[in-house]
Image (cartoon, rainbow, N blue to C red):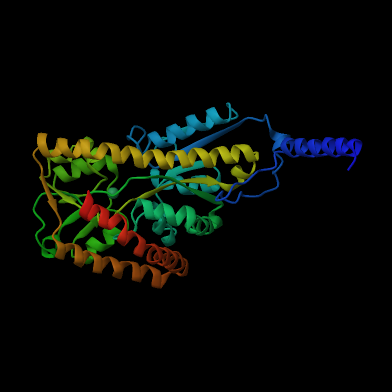
Amino acid sequence: MNKESRRTFLKQSIKAATASVALGTPLLGIGCAKPETGPNDAPAVHARKKFRWRMLTTWPPTLFVLQDGPKLFVEWVKKMSEGRLEIQVYGADELVPALETFGAVSQGTAEIGHGASYYWAGKIPAAQFFSAVPFGMNPQQINAWLISGGGLDLWKEVYAPFNLLPLPGGNTGIQMGGWFNRPINSVADLKGLKMRIPGLGGKVISKAGGTAVLTAGGEIYTNLERGVIDATEWIGPYHDYLMGFYKIARYYYYPGWHEPGTNLEFFINKSAFLKLPIDLQQIIRNASAQVHHWMLCEFESKNNLYLQKLVTEENIALRQFPADVLEKLRTYSAEVVEEITADDVLSRKVYDAYTSFRSQITPWSDISEKVYYRNLL
Ligand code: CA
């Protein structure tokens, strides 16, 4: 190549590179999620267009962490997009009741929602395996499955018929077993017990001879105080302390076998998402990833502060479930999952993927985390 033709070649290369940037060709790094593709993949055309969205959450408007996450999401999206995507957040019952948010976003009443996928178990049994499985994976393992083990792709497939795109949106960490007004010394003590416990855990309590009651967050305290229920689980020490359960139930049991790290979610109306230019789509992905990370950090950093307050200031009886009670609950949990997956092809597919990933990583967890916790911490 002589001097002149080298100069021409360089000029053409620069031109081509500039054109590629101008068109906003996405440069995907290793491990980046595949983008949703649609008819509007031309960001340059929409570059300065402004979008206004509504977000519906399943949480009371002032609930710490769980409602703070969606609020931070909105703030971060606004900053990253320089105001091109503004989202108004509505808590439970502000626009629609908590358990109707999924349908409302699916139908386009709002563009995005935040909640936990086990709330939709009545409509989509397979959905609950993306939130919490009794005696299932911990937050670190669930994240590994969702982000690097194909779990999120499967979750997208489950939500696709509803025109929804799911994204991981937080994790509560391992929860507590709950508040009881009598000690649980054997499985027999669960017989006749009326307990507020949602999801698969509730089905397990029913198998143990108890009655699982679904009570909205705002009514649990009064129901426990009046004896409408004998026991309740909620989240962990931080949130349980703020709910004041220690004033009306003495026994605080661990571990939260029924929710060993509940994964939370954003669910996005797919048509609305595809109308966004690619950079705003990516901003949504980034903000949700940031919320996902932030929430678990909040729970982990605050739980012990409040656990200590409960133990030292409120003098609660902190108890571990006896080993034989946990063993029995584990057996019932396996039966519950078996029954659900036997009746529903999609649940079977999701649960098979869940268990297959879990058994693939367990030998590693056995010689790393487990040994470290047991012997070195
Ligand atoms: Ca819970």
Residue 198, located in which quarter of the rendered image?
bottom left
Front position in the image: 241 or 174: 174
Residue 69, located in which quarter of the rendered image?
top left
Provide residue 92's location: percent of width, then percent of height: 39, 39
Up-down relation of residue 282 to residue 210 (above or below)? above
Front position in the image: 55 or 32: 32
Provide residue 132's location: percent of width, then percent of height: 35, 55
- Left or right, 121 with reference to 164: left
Q: Residue at x 45, y 65 (%)?
A: 353
Provide residue 23's location: percent of width, then percent of height: 74, 38
- Left or right, 273 with reference to 359: right
Q: Residue at x 35, y 39 (%)?
A: 297
Whether residue 72 can be seen here? yes
Q: Residue furthest bottom?
A: 342
Up-down relation of residue 49 to residue 193 (above or below)? above
Q: How many marks?
A: 0
Q: Residue at x 33, y 59 (%)?
A: 365
Whether residue 258 can be seen here? no
Quadrant holding the N terminus: top right
Q: Residue furthest front?
A: 2
Provide residue 191's location: percent of width, then percent of height: 14, 63
Front position in the image: 146 or 365: 365
